[in-house]
Image: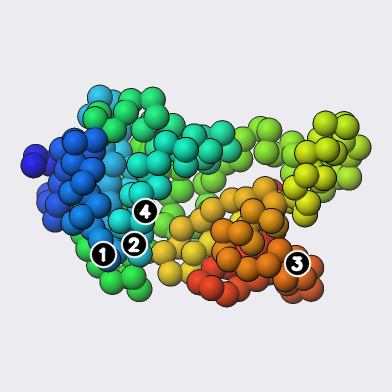
Amino acid sequence: MKNNNCNNNINIIPVVSYSNADKDKFFVYKENKNKSGIYCWNNLITGKSYIGSSISLRNRFSNYYSLVYLKKKVEKGSSIIYNSLLKYGYSNFSIDILEYCEPNVLIKREQYYLDVLKPEYNILKTAGSSYGFKHTIKTIEYIRSIKLGRKRDEATKLKLSASSLAYPVTVKNIITGEVKFFTSIRQTAKFIGIHPSYLTKCLATKGFYKGRGFDVTKTLI
């Protein structure tokens, strides 16, 4: 399979390249099972790319290949690459596995490729960091309304009552450095696999939760 955007004009040869992310889906899953490393999505139409890393590449790609997952992320405005995959389709993307490496050096190696290749789709310019992340206007106003104690309309109150403990939370994977953002304690606890009340207690008493491979803090702007 031919190499594409991620190594254009740079002497970087991926260990594996999939020229059509749609047709090569089976091989992407099969060949990256139980492997950790650095990957790159290449838009064959625009020439833009995205670099990421994961301790479990197969699991990470299963998220990318889930239209439900992509749409949820796009609704939250959390990633340009998700929106682009939905817009252009998998057949207009190729995937490069830039290298396989041990989990303890993932962030360091990802940062190397971010610095060298400067992928256009990456919002975060520092691997494993929330630096450079921009909330959507809707999210910013929502967070500010919580901080300033503004009166919410009845529709918002009903929405919050259906999803208690609704304030923004930042979750960082300690091993991979991947950062996720949630709008409630309940969502966060479900993602990590702990009880919401325990997570609430930790954030209220210590200001953070650290366990199960994650660092959890309240989102600040």
Residue, disc 4: 60
Q: Residue at coordinates 37% horizontally, 53% vertically from top-left?
A: 60
| Residue corresponding to mark 1 | 35
Q: Which three-letter amino acid code belongs to the residue tagged 1? A: Lys
Mark 4 and mark 2: Cα distance apart in space: 6 Å
In this view, the residue in front, 39 or 60, is 60
Compared across the picture, whether 20 is left or right of 213 comes to left
Among the two numbered marks 1 and 3 on one chain, the one whose residue lies closer to the N terminus: 1
| Label at residue 134 | none
The residue to which callout 3 is attached is 197
Q: Name the amino acid type tagged 4.
A: Arg
Read off the residue under disc 2: 56
Q: Position of residue 16 (x, y in %)?
A: 14, 52
Query: In screen coordinates, is 11 left or right of 114?
Result: left
CA distance for labels 1 and 3: 34 Å
Q: Decide: marks 1, 2 in contact (CB < 8 A)?
A: yes
Callout 3 secondary element: helix
Label 1, residues with CA under 10 Å away: few <14, some 14-19, many ≥20: some
